[in-house]
Amino acid sequence: MQPNGLGTDPQAGNAPGLAQIIDGKAHAEGLRREVRDKVARMKAVHGVTPGLAVVLVGNDPASEVYVRSKARQAIDAGMRSLEFRLPEDAHADELLALIERLNGDTEVHGILVQLPLPPHLRPTLVINAIDPMKDVDGFHISNVGMVGTGQDAIVPCTPLGCMMMLRHLHPDLRGKTALVIGHSNVVGKPMARLLLNADCTVMIAHKSSTDIPTLARLADIVVVAVGVPGLVKADWIKPGATVIDVGISRVPAPGNGVQEDGSVRTRIVGDVDFENVRHVAGAITPVPGGVGPMTIACLLANTLSACCHLHGIADASLQFE
Ligand code: GUN
């Protein structure tokens, strides 16, 4: 068995002379299987079913897809899934009242308000209204502060998934030089804090940084999350470095993607020039199939942990002998 609970090695079967492909799909499958087994045990031993409440305000099509996927995967893991939809013009008080109700609901262990919110709603006000123990996104200021000061807390899902894959590859991250490109509250900043907590030497670059290629060439680990297709080039990368690509952009397929019937075919790409960088890097996440699948798997893991904490159940009691 691999350390992440997988029966097969997600780094196995890579071509010689090219970077190892970090198989996020296999990592996510392993994590989902572990969560599913523990949820079954939680129900059987403790009589508790973890519950995840997802709140969507408005009709953003991408958010609709994410919310459906989160609900389906929660159910597949054996959890209770609750979906709440409010109209685009919902008043802040209506949303805050719903959060208050979910905070007090003992059958709800995780609360997630899908972002982005419509412009009239302030995300910080909404997120900070969630009970920090149920904040399975790890966005509440008290979880942010605890991670920032190296304490145990709920960790945002995408950076958590990146860290799990990095630790599988490098069990000891101490002393490694890392560059995080992008300083969003959702990925870049928490990612940098987690790498620092692992005793990496951390640089953070963003849109006002100068000469990012020079910073990147110093790095043993590059994590990029900016949404600029193909930004990171092969000559930015130190030979053998590990490259984690969080970017997801939809671009026209080769040849402008125009089909005979006039429709435009698209494909998903990351922030890394994958085809060239894979000749220099030691290991790399593909897009799709890299970081993406780990995000929802980590949301399920966070919901299970929140449920354990709220019921005073030790994670060890869910392990199979
Ligand atoms: N929108 C895009 N990514 C996320 C996420 O990780 N959490 C929430 N709540 N909304 C998002």
Image (cartoon, grey):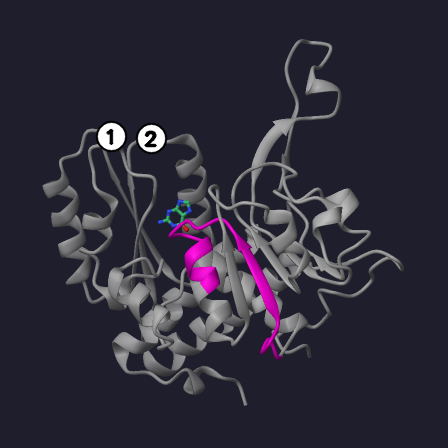
Please tell me whether residue 316 is drawn above or below residue 251 in the rendered image: below
User: Residue at the spot x=40%, y=38% of the render?
Assistant: 63
Give the class, few, some or many, for how many residues have Cα within 10 Å of label 2's Cα (few <14, many ≥20). few
Would you say residue 6 is visible in this rendering? no
Q: Are marks 1 and 2 in contact (CB under 8 Å)?
A: yes
Please tell me whether residue 186 is drawn above or below residue 11 in the rendered image: above
Tell me if 314 is positioned left or right of 285 in this view.
Answer: left
User: Residue at the spot x=38%, y=76% of the render?
Assistant: 150
Tell me if 141 is positioned left or right of 185 in this view.
Answer: left
The residue that label 1 is drawn on is 88
Please tell me whether residue 96 is drawn above or below residue 255 in the rendered image: below
Q: Residue type at mark 2: give it.
A: Asn
**Residue nearest the viewer, comparing 187 with 252:** 187
Please tell me whether residue 121 is drawn above or below residue 133 in the rendered image: above
The residue that label 2 is drawn on is 59
**Residue nearest the viewer, comparing 176 with 58:** 176
Badge 1 element: loop
Quadrant of the frame with the N terminus: bottom right
Q: Position of residue 48 (x, y in %)?
A: 31, 73
Q: Which residues are magenta?
A: 172-192
**Residue nearest the viewer, comparing 163 with 177:** 177
Q: Is residue 178 magenta?
A: yes
Q: Tell me where residue 229 sits by quadrant.
A: top right
Q: Is mark 1 within 8 Å of ligand 1?
A: no
Quadrant of the frame with the C terminus: bottom right
User: Residue at the spot x=48%, y=60% of the render?
Assistant: 159
Q: Position of residue 287 (x, y in %)?
A: 65, 45
